[in-house]
């Protein structure tokens, strides 16, 4: 096994393959910086070129893309408050307030350092766990997955700050919006009528862009000035951010492992991972006042997790042929094109390909994060440009990001509709993350609840996994409440900073 | 009365003009597709088996069609293939410059007339198709060792399905054999149902033959799973034949005979015979509109014939076709003919079955 490990490194070191790896990293960075796109789109772009390519090079390129996107998507999240991809929505919560305080470089430095370390931990975890992952992945059936969505929903509490009622309302609205479209377990389409467009439901990309991007753009234009309110020296910011990451290294480790763990469970998707990590770090931190106003931990935790998850989602993909995220479905197609069958036999007969994947993941994370660090200074200067110069370009990018998925004009209607909703929510002080969480989790929760019932009648409630996760959820909710009471603070995390309610 | 000489003269004049016209048009004739671009609509997200097949064809067919057009594959996902299919059916010109890659499930949906799907198979002409067989297995936890005793299960056997039409052929097979099963919808894909089988939450499971050979066979060898039957194929004469990917496995009609002691017959059997050939091409079918110019259709067919013999295509496609040859020419026409000969009662039966059991809505 050690021999394959080293052998794979030499295989990858071939100039053509390294070139393809870094081409993938470059594509991933470009796709990550533009909001609304995502790893899936980047990989789909290169899919036609995979036919007839050397398998190692092709896989290296795809891994390069998927590893670089979670690093680079921090740029729009921090600098403009626009979720770069579904994997970096939670970074907006604290990253953007930091940019508004003039500390964009610090936030970005911390984010990329966390991304680098998180990605490496993901690769190491993949190496260590993949021989044992089979029974762990098999242990999560529909009932356990349902309980995990309940756990996710319990985070709404922490994300509502001291406005629990408004948070619940927003979450309920999100759950309702999530029901639009095809029912997960029956052959009916809800709230869609004869609009075929709505059969798939609303698109997460468009909802997130509308809710978070448009209100910020509108408010900034109305206010005037630049994104950064107080000019501050950029220079030390970057190193300061990296030092912050080192200071919180245990946080990085903890959240990377959570990212890997949640990513390895097939059926949850990857959009919820950074919210779960943000919720956990906000809940368990001592001194939670600054969350939502620019606490660097609110950047470090989700960023390490969403890079580490790339290692996690590879586990069900390689071991079972079940994609751990939508981008992994493309990787499976690529494996099929190259004649590689996912399954346990990969570990015996194709071990060098597995290690090439792992090495690609590690190198792409390091390379991607380093390139992003180099780009930080020039790009962070954008926060000092008066916003009315930037706004048209940003609007175009946001609209194209929403448009590119299906090229249908209802996409734009939805984008502006949610933009309006997001702006109203900001005005009345209703937190927006719970809406997004409800929206993401609703189809999953419904699907797994019905499947659990169909498979096990009511016996699924007694399963040990279910009880463990239920206990964890209760502990999270109760523990959070107790921490809050003991700290004596009247306000919880995510205080609205002036009128900037997230 | 015209004299014979005049008549003869006229005939020669007419003949001469006809020959001249023919020569001119032939000498000036260039292939229909020369300098043109064909758009291949793939109504799915990138990355599935059908998408990969569509891209494979897009890449290789182009150089074999007379005139060497370019073929560009375009994903138009949404609403379980409805978006792309409706666009192909209604919003593109019928000039042979747009093709559709359909999965077997889409073929079934169009065949049955699912609500809001505007694609009609009788307005289409198949160009090339890719077959794939299916195999059903049972978990040893169900306590059944012999496929012939399938009907004697103690309680309904759980079967994971993605959506009712997506799993229709396996459901109809179970209905035909008279097995008590309990469908569990909600699985995202066939791989997820296989995961459910491995977890022990599903008793019955159907996979494509290549997926069975790659990932379920190890479970069979461990004794955790027992193979039951292959769906089988139907040959050009309409007789059931074994799956070429698994020639040793009995097929549904053979198992029926084993259980009930006679050959299958009746409405469910007719439904089975109607559904299986359409789903046999699960990997993908490339459709063109059937009212495109005759020259275009002829050139497409010529392209397919040449591509099928091209060693470069066969080598590139080996992994994607997973051991099955492409269907083209007469075999393809046979499938279309079989489809058109399906009695309307069978379609009505299938629709009623899907509506009462699963709540689907048809046109």
Image (cartoon, helix red, strand yellow):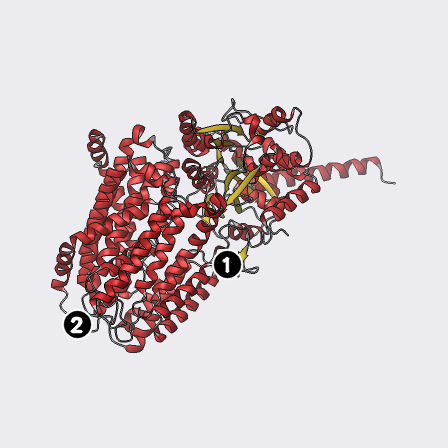
From the image, state whether disc 2 or disc 1 is nearer to you.
1
Q: Residue at x 41, y 70 (%)?
A: A421
Q: Residue at x 65, y 28 (%)?
A: B237
Q: Residue at x 23, y 63 (%)?
A: A483
- The residue carrying mark 2 is A231
Residue A348, percent across and down? Answer: 30, 28
CA gap between label 2 and label 1 equals: 45 Å
- The chain letter under disc 1 is A
Residue B12, percent across and down? Answer: 73, 36
The answer to whether residue A371 is visible is no
Residue farthest top in this picture: B248
- The residue carrying mark 1 is A198
Q: Secondary structure at mark 2?
A: loop
State which quarter of the image contains the N terminus of chain B: top right
Q: Secondary structure at mark 1?
A: helix
- Decide: is A416 above or below B252: below
Residue B94, percent across and down? Answer: 58, 49
- Decide: is B26 above or below A231: above
Residue farthest right in this picture: B1
- Decide: is B307 above or below A253: above
Location of residue A93 by image quarter = bottom left
Q: Answer with left or right where residue B114 lies relative to residue A98.
A: right
Task: Using the image as rendered, state which of residue B338 and residue B264 is in the foreground.
Answer: B264
């Amino acid at each position: 096994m050690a021999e394959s490990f080293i052998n794979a490194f030499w295989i990858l070191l071939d100039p053509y393959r390294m070139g393809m790896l870094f081409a993938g990293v470059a594509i991933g960075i470009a796709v990550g910086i533009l909001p609304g796109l995502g790893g899936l789109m980047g990989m789909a772009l290169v899919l036609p070129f995979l036919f007839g390519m050397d398998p190692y090079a092709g896989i290296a390129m795809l891994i390069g893309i998927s590893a670089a996107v979670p690093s680079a998507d921090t740029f729009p999240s921090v600098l403009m408050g626009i979720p770069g991809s579904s994997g970096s929505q939670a970074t907006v919560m604290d990253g953007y307030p930091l940019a508004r305080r003039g500390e964009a470089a610090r936030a970005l430095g911390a984010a990329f350092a966390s991304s680098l370390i998180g990605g490496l931990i993901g690769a190491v975890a993949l190496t260590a766990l993949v021989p044992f992952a089979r029974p762990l992945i098999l242990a999560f059936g529909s009932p356990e997955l349902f309980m995990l969505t309940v756990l996710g929903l319990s985070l709404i509490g922490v994300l509502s700050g001291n406005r629990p009622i408004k948070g619940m309302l927003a979450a309920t609205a999100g759950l309702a919006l999530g029901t639009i479209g095809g029912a997960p377990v029956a052959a009916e389409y809800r709230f869609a009528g004869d609009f075929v467009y709505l059969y798939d439901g609303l698109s997460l990309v468009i909802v997130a862009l509308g809710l978070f991007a448009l209100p910020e753009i509108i408010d900034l234009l109305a206010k005037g000035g630049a994104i950064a309110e107080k000019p501050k020296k950029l220079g030390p910011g970057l190193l300061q951010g990296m030092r912050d990451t080192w200071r919180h290294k245990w946080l990085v480790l903890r959240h990377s492992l959570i990212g890997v763990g949640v990513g390895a469970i097939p059926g949850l998707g990857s959009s919820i991972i950074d919210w779960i990590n943000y919720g956990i770090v906000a809940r368990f931190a001592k001194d939670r006042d600054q969350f939502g106003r620019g606490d660097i931990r609110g950047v470090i935790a989700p960023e390490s997790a969403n890079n580490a998850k790339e290692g996690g989602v590879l586990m069900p993909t390689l071991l079972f042929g079940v994609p751990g995220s939508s981008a992994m479905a493309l990787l499976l197609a690529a494996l099929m094109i190259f004649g590689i069958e996912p399954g346990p036999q990969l570990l015996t007969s194709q071990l060098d390909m597995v290690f090439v994947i792992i090495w690609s993941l590690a190198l792409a994370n390091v390379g991607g994060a380093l390139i992003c660090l180099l780009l930080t200074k020039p790009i962070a200067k954008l926060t000092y440009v008066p916003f009315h110069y930037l706004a048209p370009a940003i609007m175009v990018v946001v609209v194209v990001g929403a448009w590119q998925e299906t090229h249908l004009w209802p996409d734009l209607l939805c984008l502006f509709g949610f933009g309006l909703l997001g702006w109203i929510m900001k005005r009345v002080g209703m937190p927006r993350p719970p809406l997004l969480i409800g929206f993401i989790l609703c189809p999953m929760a419904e699907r797994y609840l019905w499947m659990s019932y169909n498979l096990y009648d009511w016996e699924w409630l007694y399963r040990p996994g279910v009880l463990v996760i239920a206990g964890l959820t209760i502990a999270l909710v109760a523990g959070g409440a107790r921490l809050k009471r003991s700290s004596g603070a009247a306000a919880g995390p995510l205080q609205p900073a002036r009128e900037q309610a997230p | 009365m015209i004299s014979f000489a005049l008549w003869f003269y006229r005939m020669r004049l007419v003949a001469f003009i006809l020959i001249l016209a023919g020569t001119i048009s032939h000498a000036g004739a260039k292939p229909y597709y020369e300098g043109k671009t064909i758009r291949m609509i793939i109504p799915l997200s990138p990355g599935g088996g059908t998408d990969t097949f569509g891209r494979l064809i897009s890449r290789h067919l182009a150089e074999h069609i007379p005139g060497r057009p370019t073929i560009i594959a375009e994903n138009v996902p949404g609403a379980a293939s409805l978006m792309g299919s409706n666009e192909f059916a209604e919003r593109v010109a019928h000039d042979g410059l747009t093709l559709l890659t359909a999965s077997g499930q889409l073929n079934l949906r169009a065949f049955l007339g699912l609500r809001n799907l505007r694609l009609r198979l009788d307005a289409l002409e198949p160009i090339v198709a890719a077959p794939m067989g299916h195999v059903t297995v049972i978990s040893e936890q169900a306590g059944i060792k012999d496929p012939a005793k399938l009907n004697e299960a103690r309680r309904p056997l759980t079967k994971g399905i993605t959506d009712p039409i997506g799993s229709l052929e396996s459901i109809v097979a179970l209905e035909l054999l008279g097995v008590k099963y309990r469908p569990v919808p909600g699985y995202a894909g066939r791989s997820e149902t296989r995961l459910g089988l491995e977890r022990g939450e599903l008793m019955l499971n159907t996979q494509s033959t290549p997926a069975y050979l790659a990932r379920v066979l190890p479970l069979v060898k461990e004794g955790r799973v027992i193979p039951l039957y292959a769906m089988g194929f139907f040959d050009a004469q309409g007789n059931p034949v074994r799956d070429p990917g698994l020639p040793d496995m009995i097929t549904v009609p053979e198992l029926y005979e084993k259980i009930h002691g006679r050959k299958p017959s009746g409405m469910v059997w007719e439904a089975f015979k109607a559904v299986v050939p359409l789903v046999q091409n699960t990997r993908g079918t490339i459709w063109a509109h059937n009212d495109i110019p005759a020259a275009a259709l002829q050139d497409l067919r010529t392209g397919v014939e040449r591509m099928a013999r091209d060693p470069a295509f066969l080598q590139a496609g080996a992994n994607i076709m997973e051991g099955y040859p492409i269907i083209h020419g007469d075999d393809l026409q046979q499938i279309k003919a079989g489809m058109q000969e399906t009695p309307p009662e069978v379609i009505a039966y299938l629709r009623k079955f899907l509506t009462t059991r699963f709540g689907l809505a048809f046109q």
